[in-house]
Amino acid sequence: MSSTKYILGLFADPDEMMDGIDKLQKNSIPIYDVYTPMPIHGIEAKLGMKDSRLGWAAFMFGCLGGTTIFSMAYYMLVHDWPMNIGGKPAFAIPDFVPFTFEWTVLFTAFGMTITFFYATHLFPGRAPRVMDFRATDDRFVIAIDAKTNTSHEDITNLLKEAGAVEVKHNDRKYVSYE
Amino acid sequence: MASHSESIIREPLITGKDITYAQITNDILRPVEKMPGRAWWIGFTVASIGACLWVFAVSWTFWFGIGEWGLNKTVGWAWDITGFVWWVGIGHAGTLISAILLLFRQNWRNSINRSAEAMTIFAVICAATYILCHMGRPWMFVYSLPLPNQYGSLWVNFNSPLIWDVFAISTYFSVSLVFWYTGLLPDLAAIRDRAVGVRRRIYSVMSFGWTGSVKTWQRFEAVCLILAGISTPLVLSVHTIVSMDFATSLEPGWHTTIFPPYFVAGAIFSGFAMVQTLLLVTRKVLGLENYITMFHIEAMNKIILLTGSIVGVAYLTEFFIAYYSGSEYEQYTFLNRFIGPYWWAGCMMYGINILMTQLMWFKSIRTNIAIAWVLSIVVNIGMWFERFVIIVTSLHRDYLPSSWAMFYPTWVDMSIFIGSIGVFFTLFLLFIRVLPSIAIAEVKLILKSSSEQAKKKVIEHGHVDPEQLEFYKESLVVFDSVDTADYEKR
């Protein structure tokens, strides 16, 4: 049995890469992942990925932020230490709008971004799991698990046919480790 | 789809022949991967001397107190708040480019958003230093936060626009930082994957382990879109709240309902001018003419013209309302801007912001790099005087003639202001040295649709309306990065 762990199809053009994905899928070859130097719309639909739910996270964090500061201001200005400013009401809702808005935005931004980092396993110092170094430069890389797809020759030919400039048979999953 | 080719009558966003994805990476990362040239060192030396001046003057202020500034009982707010509003205003263009233009799907933002956002962050840092400095005792900053304390707790007054400002500026700074850094991740990964040794380690830590897998990009785009969506009202709220610092007072000249939209327009006006000042030099020094093209320069000049004209209308409205209010204090304040001792500041403000900006109506001026650069600096001089006139000229003669006074800045005032410009440029120069000054991934996105070579391919294929082709060729004449001789042969 060959020692190849992953087959990588390297494309120089995003449209040819899309063609490659189609060809592989037509032949019922599952794709492990695709690495691109820029966001290519349409891959996630082809790979059957669900829509991101980060929007919901953003909404929930926004609600949390707005509620937090509004409750804090209510406690401080109305409950704990109401001030008599010319006999005006302590619970002056219009004045509460600016900072409630600011914290809604603040919590949305931080909550959503941290959720994104958490879900995608991004954090400072994380060892990069890079399959091909040029995937952040000028190569659009389709990765196929070679252990479960044994017809390596067919996969190579399919990728070449679609316009892959190079097909790699890698013995290691990630090339970024020492 | 990446292969979608757009209309030929749109000017290209990337010029140059045979630009490949690899070349985009190479061109943009050249200043990061090579030692900087002489121009960078000269700029950095001058800027860091300015930054040292700032450190000295601020230390002086903290040691001897803000009595070292030229403030007096009448003019209790002068260059400090002028500088603060000026810097915050400058910051606004970055968010406008990165957020509002993203929502409007303006692809030309892709090559200027990174440096404009960086500029935002550095400008807000400069603005924030003014807030800390003018407290005199900077550790007292803690009392502007709603934290429990031993006085009761005596809470902050949430009814005050100054407290809103604390919330607005801190939120604005941190959200801008998050937006900017998230956008940097794919480009940091690009540097990481090309670097070796220590550099690889550093950029590896900074890139958070970015790989560019499908799911990562999908989430990344969702995050960017939502961040743009929330940053848009945020940026409008920030300068609205800054303007309320003045507008909610009873001071003639400040007590004006037009302030929020007027300040926001002025902020974008001065911010775009600063982006122009920086990018016209940056594109030349770093050799990025193919990515920051004449189209970008002209588009920014058009926004300067638009926002400058909105500011002009706001000025006229203010004068009319002062007259129409029938309030003699209000009327005197506005008359005083021309006939009082600060008439020269008023002339600078109105002359530059209303008259000079109108030069941008001429295409020959919008597309002349030297003139556009000079005008962009002139705009920011005018906008500094706008804040000076609003603040000092209003304060120095208000209700009580017996308290009328003049404001004379001391060397400390001047050094802090000049020094803050030094701090700003030091940070910006360090930024273009260690981080990609153009969003690499986003520029790659438009290579197949909006580049000059893509349009050339469309022309070669034929089927182009000759009238449209002629229009396209004519629009390319002003581009300094396009050789029009290439088109003559056909």
Image: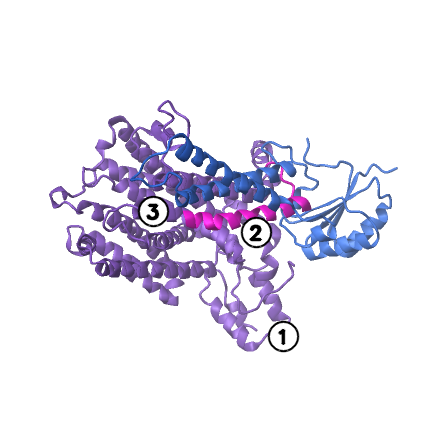
Residue that mark 2 sits on? B442
Q: Is residue A4 above or below residue B480?
A: above
Residue bearing the label numbered 1: B463
Chain name for mark 3: B
Quadrant into which the N terminus of chain B falls: bottom right
Q: Position of residue A44 (x, y in %)?
A: 70, 50
The majority secondary structure of the magenta stretch comes to helix
Indicate the colouring scheme.
by chain
Question: For residue B244, which numbered disc appears in the image?
Answer: 3
The chain identifier of the residue carrying mark 2 reads B
Which residue occupies 50% across, 44% down? B31
Where is residue A48? Give x, y as percent.
74, 50
Residue B326 versus residue B361: which sits nearer the camera?
A: B326
- Identify the residue at image location x=24%, y=47%: B251
Q: Residue furthest right?
A: A1
Q: Is residue B225 magenta?
A: yes
Q: Residue at x 22, y 32 (%)?
A: B68
Q: Which chain is blue?
A: A
User: Which span of residues is magenta-colored?
Assistant: B208-237
Residue B392, image x, y percentages: 22, 46
Chain B: its colour in the image is purple
Q: Name which of mark 2 and mark 3 comes first in the sequence.
A: 3
The first of marks 1 and 3 along the sequence is: 3
Q: Are marks 1 and 2 in contact (CB under 8 Å)?
A: no
B66 or B438: nearer the eye? B66
